[in-house]
Amino acid sequence: MEKLRIAQIAPLIERVPPEKYGGTERVVYHLTEELVRRGHNVTLFATGDSLTSARLVALVDKGLRLGGREFSCFHCSMSELTRAYQEMSGAFDVIHSHLEYMTFPFAASSRIPTVMTFHGRLDNPDIVRLMQQYRQLHFVSISNAQRLPVFDVPWAGTVYHGYPLADFSFQPDAGDYFAYLGRISPEKAPDEAIRIAIDADVPLRIAAKIDPVDQGYFNEVVRPLMTHPLIEYVGELGEHDKLELLQHARGLLNPINWPEPFGLVMIEALACGTPVIVRACGSAPEIITHGRDGFVCHDHKGFVEAVHRIGEIDRARCRKTFESRFTVAHMVAGYERIYERLLYGDQVRRTGVFPPVLEKGVDRVTLR
Amino acid sequence: MEKLRIAQIAPLIERVPPEKYGGTERVVYHLTEELVRRGHNVTLFATGDSLTSARLVALVDKGLRLGGREFSCFHCSMSELTRAYQEMSGAFDVIHSHLEYMTFPFAASSRIPTVMTFHGRLDNPDIVRLMQQYRQLHFVSISNAQRLPVFDVPWAGTVYHGYPLADFSFQPDAGDYFAYLGRISPEKAPDEAIRIAIDADVPLRIAAKIDPVDQGYFNEVVRPLMTHPLIEYVGELGEHDKLELLQHARGLLNPINWPEPFGLVMIEALACGTPVIVRACGSAPEIITHGRDGFVCHDHKGFVEAVHRIGEIDRARCRKTFESRFTVAHMVAGYERIYERLLYGDQVRRTGVFPPVLEKGVDRVTLR
């Protein structure tokens, strides 16, 4: 497709890519790198210590969370949007914002088309009302399930997150343990993961960060369960150790208890060849095909049975699911198609012909 | 002056007026009532249970703090601004927002002039940068001290807060105790108020709310000091009991330890005839004239001396300060002048004549 001048607007709470936790910043990193690789002229609005091949516009030196400046996050993000929309807008063909709602008044009053990816859950009536007020904008969901609470706005599409093929090496032979990765929080349900492992009599390794808000839940609910000899807590891991843990796991235990918008950890597991055992919440049934990529379960008994049946899943097939649906190439092709539709929509409607941007293997990129 | 169609946009965190704590909502209440009384056509954007003589536009049923919906505050406020600026903007001559920074992109892209009152402290470089990006807007400070960190934008003026004369009855005869009113928080320094009372050997009554974030400070620093027989903690008081407490106090002990933007409690005390002993922080020296309305102190020794000298202050003179500087009439005349300047600025500049909106006794309303 034609090369575009694209602004990517990232949150400032973490570096791009994040040093540890930070799914949005990780996705923005890979998206930006691949857009540059494909020849687009990309400007990344992010923290000053971000790593990028794009032109970097930094409103703050480093991630506000690790820098202890979370208080300023709102003001800094407003400054960032102002820089993009009011001070530099002539420089872009399209603006792609990951700042969600704060972007609305900027996008609504700008002549530059904006693509907005929502990274969080939307099942809140106050969010639904706000999005309905801006239904003329171009919203992108990261799973079809995510958009269910806001079904009556004209979504521009669903684009699944994707990772570079080369970042994950396939591991055909698993170790003996299962893995839990993520945050220690009630909605991610590590306590249930522990109970499943104990009842199924398999070792479980837990790698997770604990936010201050979840310290009480950790102390009162999770920590008492961790004394069991099958359970090992290894803390918040860096990228390399996380991959190591995933690659050698027999399966990822992911008994989430909330409407997960996407769930990066699931495609990280698949990329290593590790099957995923997940509750049928949010995006899970879209990402994991039951009986092929792992198991989609409904209750405790189902999880325990799934653990026992993990040997039925072909690890090479898990890797193939990743390669055929969840790479950066798929993600970027999805966004390119949406950018193009926004910019050349009239032409497309007139000729009935889409510019040839969809690569083979891209699926589930739905357009309005 | 000409009657205007005015939108007042209040925060949604508390009712207008607030049930207990909530300075901004209290000011918006009095401002709105007085504007209606003067014949303006006022629309108040606030919670549905707000009390007002204006037309009410409510995006939520009741205050989000007491309703346990603080999480939704951002989304609801964005919806509120969208309603005002995008769905109803044709209905107003001027929009007066109390939502601060969130208002910026709306105001910047609207043809309706916006007046923005800042209610909080501004001494944060991220706030300063953001305000500089919107220097074309019309900012109002609530004290001259408040604007010091953002001195190089063209402020539209300072308008002090004001209360209705009739809401406070002058009490010539004081009781034997001093009073502390406000939040229990390190920046308000109730612990220092206690130490001053103990060292000066006078009774102190403390009426204050405790936010969850300050519970640790209360438990560790303040509570141990409260066991002294001179100290009495009476909790968070409703409006009537608060006035009762203030009226009969010999003085208000206000050893704030932060750049107070205004300090409503000081004019509440003056309205009752109660002198104020305050640290020379933020707005204090503008509000309190040392030796006339109370004392402006610099250190612990100064505070203890001021307590001993409280009999030198004429309570009737304190009330007179309130009547001549801090009534609703003064506040509204200040805002009317700013609205008029925004709307008829060109005419004023051409003729060199201001419309006759300033009432006798209005002081310190500075215009750019």
Image (tube, coloured by chain):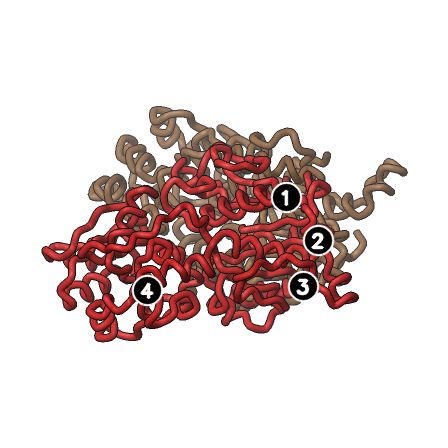
Chain colours: A red, B brown
Residue drawn 37% across and 25% down? B299
Q: Quick one: A300 or B141, which is closer to the camera?
A: A300
Q: Which of the two discs, 1 and 3, labels the residue nearer the N terminus?
A: 1
Q: Residue tagged by mark 1?
A: A40
Q: Are marks 2 and 1 on the same chain?
A: yes
Residue A345 locus on image (x, y percent): 72, 61
Q: Which of the two discs, 2 and 3, labels the residue nearer the N terminus?
A: 2
Q: Residue tagged by mark 2?
A: A109
Mark 3 burial class by Cα count in 10 Å: few <14, some 14-19, many 20+: few
The secondary element bearing badge 2 is classed as loop
Q: Quadrant of residue A108?
A: bottom right
Q: Residue tagged by mark 4?
A: A256
Q: Which chain contains the residue that carries disc 2?
A: A
Which numbered marker is on residue B219? none
Q: Quick one: B47 or A359, which is closer to the camera?
A: A359
Mark 1 burial class by Cα count in 10 Å: few <14, some 14-19, many 20+: some
- Between circles 2 and 3, the one closer to the viewer is 3
